[in-house]
Amino acid sequence: MTLLEARGLRKTFGGIVAVDDVSFEVDRREIVGVIGPNGAGKSTTFKLLAGFHRPDEGIVRFDGEEVTDLGPEKRAQRGMVRTFQIAQELTGMRVMENMLLAAQNHPGEKVLAAAANTSSVRDYESDARDRAEELLKFLELWDLREEYAGNLSGGQRKLLELGRALMAEPDLLLLDEPMAGVNPDLTDRLLQRIMELRDERDMTFLVVEHDIEAIMRISDTVIGMHDGKVLSKGTPEEVQSDERMLEAYLGG
Ligand code: ADP
Ligand code: MG
């Protein structure tokens, strides 16, 4: 049942202990939210999981195999994908092009198969187009498919970032503040989509987010961090009423 496992993770920067003996598990088909005050170690934990940082100590396991020494691309190949902000050079490209490029960048097996002969290249391209169309409709971005990414609102861009990550068909999606800068209407839609992807496509999510209300609404399990440590873990109700969490926020 466990898809992602963090075991004894520790990361220091000079004298600062950013992440201190962090362990937890994420089950398949689970939405796990990570909350905590500024400086709690959320982003560093995220980067350790995504492969941007190597831990000083501890291991990361995905789907039963250790991935601690793999970089982000290798982890993505195994089905562990993170969203990333639309890069500057992609803002001058259209929404549909952005989606197709995300598929092209995905170093999956299909690309290798496609390289083998031209007819499968064509299959791969039409497959990617179909997938992009389906996802853009799902994210309610289809009417904007010919719009330049740079002209999208902040919220629409977040949806496009989600769409680009979904082009890789990940088993686990790592989201760093997906709700930041998104207006309340779009936030609701984004949260709704995440829950649908869990229910309909058996996807697993790990979400780092400042918007506690949003996290509490969608998460099956919440991890509360403080001072680089996991302070509390449980259902949203359990973590919300945990005295240690209340203290960590108030005493911030
Ligand atoms: P959060 O995302 O919960 O706000 P971070 O993981 O960003 O927390 O930071 C945890 C601690 O580690 C903070 O004290 C932060 O200043 C420090 N830190 C994070 N990244 C770096 C870095 N690259 N270099 C130096 N210190 C860092
Ligand atoms: Mg952060």
Image: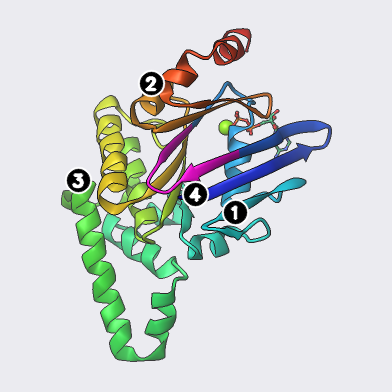
CB atoms at circles 4 and 3 under 8 Å apart?
no
Circle 2 residue? 213
The amino acid beneath tag 2 is: Glu
Between marks 1 and 2 in the image, the one whose residue lies nearer the viewer: 1
Q: Look at the numbered disc 2 and say if its residue's Cβ is closer than 8 Å to ligand 1.
A: no
Residue at numbered disc 3 = 140
Distance, label 1 to label 2, CA atoms, is 29 Å
Q: Report which quarter residue 237 is drawn in.
A: top left
- Secondary structure under tag 1 reads strand
Query: Are there few (<14), some (14-19), or many (20+) residues within 10 Å of tag 2?
Result: few
Q: Is residue 208 left or right of residue 135?
A: right
Q: Quadrant of the C terminus?
A: top right
Can you give x and y, in whole percent of width and height, for residue 174 in the image? 47, 46
Image coordinates of residue 66 in percent, x first then y, are 63, 59
Respond yes or no on whether mark 4 lies under 8 Å from ligand 1. Answer: no
Q: Which mark is residue 61?
A: 1
Residue found at x 59% / y 33%: 42
Q: Report how far apart the C-alphas of labels 1 and 3 lie in the structure.
A: 34 Å
Q: Residue at x 44, y 67 (%)?
A: 105
Q: Earlier in the sequence, mark 1 or mark 4?
A: 4
Q: Distance between the Cα atoms at labels 4 and 3?
A: 32 Å
Distance Cα–Cα, label 1 vs label 4: 9 Å
